[in-house]
Image: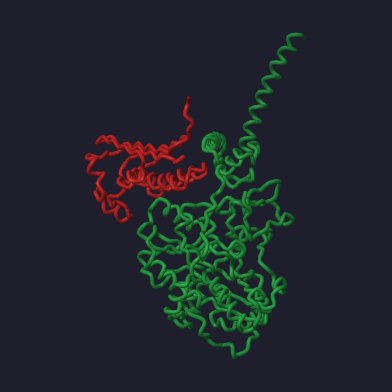
Chain colours: A green, B red
Amino acid sequence: MAQYHHSLRFDVDRCDGCMSCMRACPTAAVRVRKGRAVKLADRCIDCGECIRVCPHAAIVPLTDQMSDLSKFECKLAIPSPALYAQFDSEIFPSMIFAALKQCGFDDVESVSPACDAVSIATEIFLNEYRGQYPLISSFCPTVVRLLQVKYPELVDQILPVLAPREISARDAKIRKSKETGLPPERIGAVYITPCPAKIVAILEHPGMQYSNLDTAVSISDLFQTLAAAVSKVQEAEYRIDATESASGLSWAFLGRFPRSLPAENTLSVAGLPNVIRILDDMEKGRLRKYRYIECHACSEGCVGGCLTVENPYLARGKAIKLQQSLPAGCIADRHEVEAAYRRGEFLMDENLASRPLRPLDEDISKAIAKMKERDQILADLPNIDCGACGAPSCHAFAEDVVLGEAEKDSCIFFFQRELTERIEQLATLVRAQKQTIGGLT
Amino acid sequence: MIQEAFESTYHVLGRDFPNAGRVSTSIKDTLKRMGIHPLVVRRIAIVSYEAEMNLVMYATRGKISLRVSLDSVSINVDDEGPGIPDVTLAMEEGYSTATPEMREMGFGAGMGLPNIRRNADEFDISSHVGRGTRLYIRVIQAA
């Protein structure tokens, strides 16, 4: 089986097998075995729902700490716009940037110009696209992975335009390299991330030969130090930079994107269960009249990421308020973007491959036999998805049994019934034996 | 020799809009777990969804049966309902008897049956007015 990168680790010492993560996992990628949660690597899409619900902090995101960044000679912070929304709306991005420099970054690059540029690139792509509709947004790595794993036949409909964070990192590295004379490989582009999925996007760089980002630090790890630094920033930083725009900030939360597309044939979806429902509808051919679907794995978008600190609804409110103080228009130059687009600078340079879950069996006749077996097992189960067997549903458990990964006896209902039958058989045997003995005495 | 096949039957109730679409999702998921080719899955997903919606919109009740054999996937739909008086007319693109209510829900463009036929390698329909409609769809799996 192929090895997949993941951005979270289950800490066995902290896990007490409470099953919270198993129940929350939208792709049924967690089992509890021997009282500890284990991750099924081929099913996990790094959405981080398990991190949110774990009461013991036993699921650790594999983001870097500030101390890990010393390997870079020059440290460039690329903050997700969701970072701005963690602060009150009178804290301008310029103040957060100044604070980031206090925290040890050599420079900060705003993603807003790239957000506006990618919006233009997306419009150009959609205008010239003649394939199957709708197209699905590519900026959320969890959504991309969900498609690769569970909807392989829709992978061709992922928009092949790069995410703004990649464009920002590339441009910032070129700029910084010119400024400092350092070769780009000694400059570390560090994404300030609201979720662990961006780590996977950096490690696996789907659709790209390599990622322009080098690593990521989480908003939640950084927040305390950053907030302290923000409170000390000088008055000179209370200004609106030319590198910020209301439209750029809007990428951090659910909304109609790109704003210039007509609303009637675009959809915005947030939250994995909702994304799954919309993709199911798409597979059934229901959404052909739509041209573009914006999909966020987290509810409310990146402001709802599991590595943020603020309540996503409050964060969204703050972001909307901050937008009112930012320039409304697009800050990217349309002609420049179009020229760069023609040079291929906004497009993925590798094919996005699907990697469907391993089926019950590669051989169709064996798969038929195993599916029959699964249904027979399922008929013996209570179908109440109690989870006591360590699988999230009777359905998943039946599959595990067929695949030889679980024992049917692990179902307490099935086991109790079997046991009762055995005891009755035994009792009958004992009665018969007694009668024989009774005849002798 | 008995042909190896997996079979499963699903029951659908007419007018059960809250659950409409679940059967086709379940069929699609089952096919994926069996490793059926994505293009076959997609065609069956479209066919079973259109058939399920027709059943929910027009019939009283019915069942949808899935059969997966070594060389093909087939769907049989058998409903109790008003039936279709003129099947030839119903097969025409754009012909629809949908109520305004159904149209409001985005159905009734008269594309359901033609869409099913377009995605099937074998297609058969028979209907008795006042009794119900039967559909048979087969999609061949390339070797």
Please, is residue A388 above or below residue A279 in the view? above
Residue closest to the eye, A433 or A379: A379
Residue closest to the eye, B34 or A97: B34
Q: Position of residue A375 (x, y in %)?
A: 53, 36
For this view, does A240 lie left or right of residue A76?
Answer: left
Residue reaching furthest top?
A: A440
- Point out the image quarter for the C terminus of chain A: top right
Q: Position of residue A4 (x, y in %)?
A: 62, 55
Please, is residue A257 above or below residue A359 in the view? below
Residue B8 showing in the rendered view = no
Residue B59 appears in which quarter of the rendering?
top left
Residue at the image position 64 percent from the left and 79 percent from the top: A100
Residue at the image position 64 percent from the left and 35 percent from the top: A415
For this view, does A358 lie left or right of residue A279?
Answer: right
Q: What is the tally of numbered marks visible in this picture?
A: 0
Residue A163 showing in the rendered view = yes
